[in-house]
Image: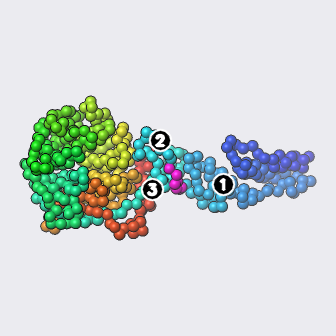
Amino acid sequence: MAAVIARKIYQSNTRPAKMTLGDATDGESQVVAAQSAQTSLKRARVLFSNCSGIPSSCLLVPRLDNELRRKAIARKTHLLYPDSIRPSGGAGSNANPASSSALTISHQSRPQEKGTDNADSSREGAIVIAGKSKKSSVRIPSPKWHAPWRLSTVISAHLGWVRSIAFEPTNDMFATGAADNVIKIFDTAKACVGAEDALKLTLTGHISPVRGLAFSPRHPYLFSAGEDKMVKCWDLETNQVIRHYHGHLSGVFALKLHPTLDILVTGGRDAVARVWDMRTKHQIHCLTGHDNTVGALLTKPTDPQVITSSYDGTIKLWDLAAGKCMTTLTHHKKAVRALAMPSFENTFLSGAADSCKKWQAKDGRLIRNFTGHNSVVNALAINDDGVAISAADDGTMRFWDYHTGYCFQSTETIPQPGSLDAENGIFAAEFDLTGTRLITGETDKTIKIWKQDEDASEVSDPIDMVVWRKQCLAEARQRY
């Protein structure tokens, strides 16, 4: 009787078992059947081991061959990781499944949906660190390689701290404003090679440091703003002031022109941003709401057309037509002294003493943090190649891959011989229109021109993926 029971158990367990996963393949069905038969035969062997008259062949436990073992391990790996992550060395592959890792590289980018911003599109070559759930998986973007930047030329022309820089729309010349109350205009090509005749023009008229400069793209005008409460419009054909914009109650710290309208926006120590009609000199709006000095401005052709940052630690996005605030961003803990915006996507970058932050310009959503500075960030700039630079009060400069937030270079400026060691702060930074030259204005009264190292390569200056991976994981742990 015992022999009959054992044979029935053996026959029933050698039939294909019912799958527990609805989407299992034929190979996984064989694995489940073999494992179920193996488990049941082990129990039968223990139960009837003392019974006589039972053939030993009925109690032998079949051993899984190598192919079934690989499929079993692949099935366990599939159940361990989320469906969105595909571990290497899957079922049926020749790779060793025991070495399957949760670290995979995906070279396929999802098609961008119509109407979405470029900042939300997935990046190619992203690395995914998988956890036990989808929420704990960390996507590590692969940074783009950029050549390091080196100091090329030093120009000593001002007698005070260089506080502002602006490029002409044709890139033929650039202007600088300093604490010596003068504006100097240089020939870009000659200045980059250190020619003695690079200085073209010197404009005098302010009685305090010049804090803001902007060239008009449609008129031969240069606009300037200073701590003397004055906003001036210079005609570069006659080199004279043709308009004054009166209204600020204290020093003017920031100045920007609207990219499509004849509108001028200024902000200063009176904690407001004023919108001016460039031709009639009338004030269109007075954007109030900040509790401290307005330190930086941005203007855009689409809403929000005006973005302001203040020393009260907030950033405001404004509706220009209504003259009202759309969104207030309070993520920064320190004074926000610098703003920058790229030309290739609808985002912007803000800089403060605590960190630099990348934002979605449409709704003010925080995208990522750029951490690393230990001092006040005074200047930000972004070129068309996706290189962002942040310059601080202690003379440090950090170069970032704007898309991923990877810092590929950290350097420190060198004070001019004869100046104090403490005079190594950077107050202004701008890329030229080609993005191949960077000009900084510093506290040692010099203008420094930087360019990329032509001899650098991915072999000589590789991307440190180990440090980048650790940084991404550390930020993910803080976030979740």
- Residue at horizontal 70 percent and vertical 50 percent from the top: 28
Percent x, y of residue 229: 11, 42
Mark 2 touching mark 3, by CB under 8 A? no
Instruction: Of the two numbered discs 1 and 2 on the same chain, state the one appearing first in sequence.
Output: 1
Amino acid type for the residue under numbered disc 2: Glu
Crowding around mark 3 (Cα neighbors within 10 Å: few <14, some 14 to 19, many 20+) is some
Amino acid type for the residue under numbered disc 3: Ser
Instruction: Of the two numbered discs 1 and 3 on the same chain, state the one appearing first in sequence.
Output: 1
Q: Which numbered disc, 1 or 2, marks the residue closer to the eye?
A: 2
User: How far is the residue under mark 1 from the one under mark 2?
Assistant: 33 Å
Q: Which label is found at residue 91?
A: 1
Q: Which numbered disc, 1 or 3, marks the residue closer to the eye?
A: 3
Report the residue marked by disc 2.
113
Q: Which residues are magenta?
A: 103-109
Magenta run includes residue 105? yes
Report the residue marked by disc 3.
142
Residue 179 as seen in the image, left or right of residue 454: left
User: How far is the residue under mark 2 from the one under mark 3?
Assistant: 22 Å
Coloring scheme used = rainbow
At mark 3, the secondary structure is loop
Above or below, 92 against 311 in this view is below
At mark 2, the secondary structure is loop
